[in-house]
Image (spheres, rainbow, N blue to C red):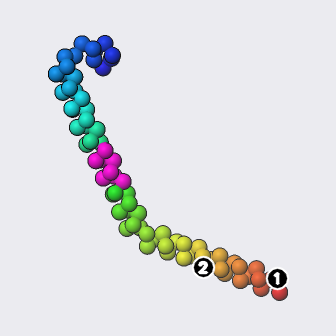
Amino acid sequence: MTHDEYESLSTKKLKKLIKRTNATLSELQEEMEKRKLDNQHSEIDHLEDHMEEVEHGFTNFMAFLKDVLKEKK
């Protein structure tokens, strides 16, 4: 709606529009919070996979480091 259209609304209609807009905003905020929580749950569900990847990378790094130290001797 344009500014002129808002000016033409009655106070009662404007209040109703504000109420509806606030309700929609609340629903959108709830949906955003739900998605955020769902994402956190998904990350937690995959935490073990992430930890295994880190462990594998660390193991490879340690093997590399041992090889480097052997070559320095």
- According to the image, label 2 marks what residue? 59
Question: Which of the two discs, 1 and 2, labels the residue nearer the N terminus?
Answer: 2
Horizontal side of 39 relative to 25 (left or right) equals right
- According to the image, label 1 marks what residue? 72
At 76% across and 83% down in the image, what residue appears?
69
**Is 32 a magenta residue?**
yes
Residue 60 drawn at (x, y percent): 63, 77
Tell which residue pokes out farthest to the front in this image: 11
| Residue type highlighted by circle 1 | Lys
| Residue type highlighted by circle 2 | Thr
Horizontal side of 58 relative to 22 (left or right) equals right
* Contact, mark 1 vs mark 2 (Cβ under 8 Å): no
Secondary structure character of the magenta stretch overall? helix
At 54% across and 72% down in the image, what residue appears?
54
Q: Is residue 57 above or below residue 43?
A: below
- Depth check, front residue: 2 or 64: 2
Horizontal side of 59 relative to 22 (left or right) equals right
Asked which secondary structure carries label 2, the reply is helix
Q: Is residue 58 above or below residue 22?
A: below
Residue 14 drawn at (x, y percent): 22, 22
The local crowd at label 1, few if under 14, some if 14 to 19, many if 20 or more residues have their Cα within 10 Å, is few
- Depth check, front residue: 60 or 31: 31
The local crowd at label 2, few if under 14, some if 14 to 19, many if 20 or more residues have their Cα within 10 Å, is few
Residue 67 drawn at (x, y percent): 73, 82
Residue 27 drawn at (x, y percent): 25, 42
- Depth check, front residue: 67 or 9: 9
Quarter where residue 12 is shown: top left
At 30% across and 20% down in the image, what residue appears?
1
Horizontal side of 17 relative to 68 (left or right) equals left
Q: How many marks?
A: 2
- Residues in magenta, as a range: 29-36
